[in-house]
Amino acid sequence: MSLISDISMSVDGFVAGPDADLDDPLGQGGEQLHEWIFGLASWRDPHGLEGGETSPDDDVVREGRSRTGAVIMGRRMYSGGSGPWEQDPNAEGWWGEQPPFETPVFVLTHHAREPKPMPNGHDFHFVTDGIEAALEQARAAAGAKDVLVAGGGEAIQQYLKAGLLDELQIHVAPVLLGDGVRLFESHVAEAPAGLECTSVIESPTGVAHLTYRAAA
Amino acid sequence: MSLISDISMSVDGFVAGPDADLDDPLGQGGEQLHEWIFGLASWRDPHGLEGGETSPDDDVVREGRSRTGAVIMGRRMYSGGSGPWEQDPNAEGWWGEQPPFETPVFVLTHHAREPKPMPNGHDFHFVTDGIEAALEQARAAAGAKDVLVAGGGEAIQQYLKAGLLDELQIHVAPVLLGDGVRLFESHVAEAPAGLECTSVIESPTGVAHLTYRAAA
């Protein structure tokens, strides 16, 4: 029952490009961070698509899916918006009636909202009382499995800075974005802190999958 | 005859800790970025020390040494100082009479200075007319070998931003520094730019050695 994060990052440290908006949710050039994933069998399956590649990339994604029992995400990852929900043009989220999440999802927000039930039973919950409360609810939902902080960068930074993150997985995509949102925008450690590198996987797509455990 | 860079970086993107000064040239916690290298045979040898480990880390360092025909570095990497040389308390550099460089070294500076001859013949040259001039002089000195931008982060950023860097090697050390000097502090790419990942090497020390070639 670890708290894990898992995000794609450019070589220069960005997890989204600049100028993200409703038409371009990943920002300028940001889709290049995720190109490695779209062809994979383990990505296509939960998105309702058949076929796809099996590869080291696919193994990484498949393993992540199998261990995840609940997902936490920031408000911006959910809808791209901020502020009151009635003023958010994307208040129902990016994914329509078929989100790719195979677990309950807990959205960090400052604006209260009833849970959003989903046909597959993996409802969205909106948590207004902070990251620790969201983690507590997610752990209860995850049972014996792990809780995944899916993003964005700010949510991962908050959990890392609070010392709550057990594992940090970074998929380094072979691109320089030049600008955008950094995974480590703020100072995530108060003082130098050691990590244990548990896995380095090179893939044919040029992505380096780096996994670290926070020192106990 | 490529222009290559080669630097150790923390997981959160820093190549030196904060508050670097003459007593602590790598900044607070910065020595942790380099711990992986000190025990290696290929590092000890040019520093006049015997013995040392052979390992994947050692292979990486040894290969870098064998291909390097000239070194370029920033003023701050050379002495930690700035401004006129006569006011720089470390004007003779960090390394005394036995620098670990096995080639001529070209130091980027705004302050003119005669070359500093070294007993081993690998003189230090001080270049005041910009990064392209330094590269031209270094190429002439390197012959058929590569030119290495050894650091610091700012010098590497300048060559990368100018489109002059052919290869970027990053040794990701398993530590979060939390603050300091970033490898990608400024926006090194004007627009998203693809890289080719040519090598990913995991080491027993938990360092991930990532090598990229800039797209032609």
Image (cartoon, coloured by chain):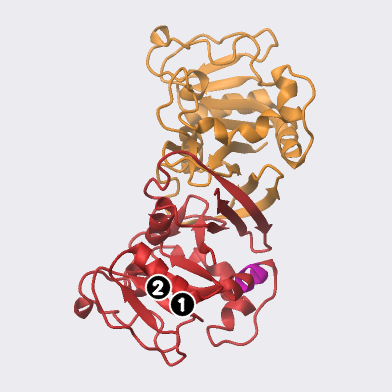
Chain colours: A red, B orange
Whether residue A180 is visible to the viewer of this picture, yes or no, is no
Relative to the observer, which residue lies in front, A188 or A135?
A135
Q: Which mark is residue A137?
A: 2
Q: Write down the quadrant of residue A116 in the picture.
A: bottom left
Across and down, in percent, residue B107 comes to 52, 21
Mark 1 residue type: Ala
- Horizontally, is A84 left or right of B112 in the view? left
- Is A61 contained in the magenta span? yes
What's the residue at 64%, 54% (across, down)?
Answer: A198
**Residue B189 in sight in this render:** yes
Question: Which quarter of the image is occupied by the N terminus of chain A?
Answer: bottom right
The image's mark for residue A176 is none
Q: Position of residue A79 (x, y in %)?
A: 33, 74
Contact (Cβ within 8 Å) of mark 1 with mark 2: yes
Residue range (magenta): A57-62
Query: Which element type, helix, strand or loop, lies under badge 1?
Result: helix
